[in-house]
Image (spheres, grey):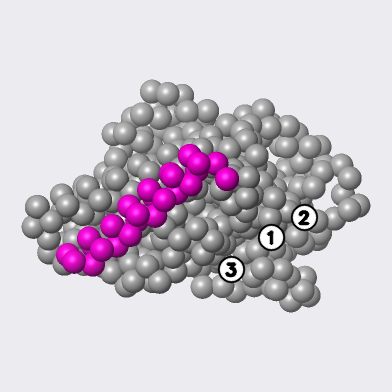
Amino acid sequence: MTTTVWEQETARAQWSALTEAAERVDKTLASLPYPTRRTPEQRDAAEAVKNRARALRARFLDGYGDAVYDRLTEGRTRGLRIDELVAAGATAFPGLVPDAGRLAQERNRPQADKEGHEIDQGIFLRAVLRSASAGPHLLDAMLRPTARARGLLPEFLRTGVVEMEAVRLERRDGVARLTMCRHDRLNAEDNQQVDDMETAVDLALLDPGIRVGLLRGGEMSHPRHRGKRVFSAGINLKNLSSGDISLVDFLLRRELGYLHKLVRGLLVEDPDRWHSPYVEKPWVAAVDGFAIGGGAQLLLVFDHVLAASDAYLSLPAAKEGIIPGVANFRFSRYAGPRLSRQVILEGRRIWASEPQARLLVDEVVDPRELDAAVERSLQRLDGEAVLANRRMLNLAEEPVDAFRAYMAEFALQQALRLYGEDVIHKVGRFAARPSS
């Protein structure tokens, strides 16, 4: 915080009240058993102190969030990714966001026994993203190549292949072919999958030998779909129940990282790129089997989508209790408000063979003809005019400030949903099912 801000009596008073409330939260929680073992009275006591601290935290950030962000980024001269930003905030402003030790304790617990400290991260990131100065700066930081991708780039440029746990990337005929290869879990998404996907997207955008990108699911070893391609089963609900899905490393990084890079491009430091600092490429997605939840969300950022005629799409957000990423922002643009509500609020499944599927999918083809159709679509998108026009379409359809405003509220609302009693109950029941 700048000296000027600390000289303000109101700022000092609000910060003092917040730190006292945060200490009270720590003392209260330390005196109580894990959340699932608490009596109703103990649960009420815990929620009361947490809500008091959160109200003070939100009020402080509403007034001084820009000053906090400037302190953490040295006057917006350093670009910090969201994980780096919340870590820096915990160190520089104890009590503002949870520190590494507190998060490590939470990480070892199932979702039902966590205290919800990630909600405090959501409050902080909402304030940052809302800001007309801090928000765009954070978006740009998230559009830069990751350190992992930069480290893998020389080898990828040489061999044209990278094998990761969740994604295989191959450069062939000027095409980046990303294959989701979590064959034992139907390409369900988790923290590792997000890391691998962002790495693959970065490499594809950084490689000058690649002109177009393709995303497709690989063949499965899962008992019900053995030997068949599957696009994605969405978020891994068993990992969510066990506490292994995080707000920052999964739910926010996914949207602000590789999905936004697919739309906006990669921000690169190159003084010779005077016309645009972003490296963009057209993208094609091909759906085999199904695109559930996060899989369906993915399709909304691709330039051309193909689906096998026996495939289906769904966004079972209401059933799971969480928010389906940025689908609430993007889906109506494709399908209109009525169909959006049927799919998102009521769980309607859209089969590729239905007329309404053509609002979301460009081509529906016989499964036996999908390979050839994919290659034709890649050829059509391979052109400089395509690249320029997709850029202008994305600017018109998804203005950066509108996206930022959505993500600001999403940061908090999704954090709250992660710890909703209905979500914990629903994913707990799902996790108890046999894996067959």
- The secondary structure that most of the magenta stretch takes on is helix
Query: Are the residues tagged 3 and 2 within 8 Å (C-beta)?
Result: no
Where is 360 relative to 311, above or below? above
Q: Provide the residue designation for mark 3.
A: 168
Looking at the picture, tell me which residue is in the foreground, 394 or 368.
394
Where is 314 relative to 356, above or below? below
Q: Position of residue 201 (x, y in %)?
A: 64, 58
Amino acid type of the residue tagged 2 in the rendering: Val
Q: Earlier in the sequence, mark 3 or mark 2?
A: 3
Query: Are the residues tagged 1 and 3 within 8 Å (C-beta)?
Result: no
Q: Is residue 392 visible in this depiction of the protein?
A: yes
Amino acid type of the residue tagged 1 in the rendering: Pro
Task: Point out the stretch of residues depicted in magenta.
Answer: 7-32
Q: Position of residue 127 (x, y in %)?
A: 50, 42
The residue located at (62%, 53%) in the rendering is 71
For label 2, count other residues whose C-alpha is less than 10 Å away and answer few (under 14), some (14-19) or many (20+). some
Amino acid type of the residue tagged 3 in the rendering: Arg
Q: Position of residue 179 (x, y in %)?
A: 56, 62
Q: Quadrant of residue 270?
A: bottom right
Looking at the picture, tell me which residue is in the foreground, 12 or 237.
12
Provide the secondary structure element on which disc 2 rests.
loop
Q: Provide the residue designation for mark 2.
A: 268
Provide the secondary structure element on which disc 3 rests.
strand
Q: Quadrant of residue 242?
A: bottom left
Q: Provide the residue designation for mark 1.
A: 145
Left or right for 45, reference 312: left
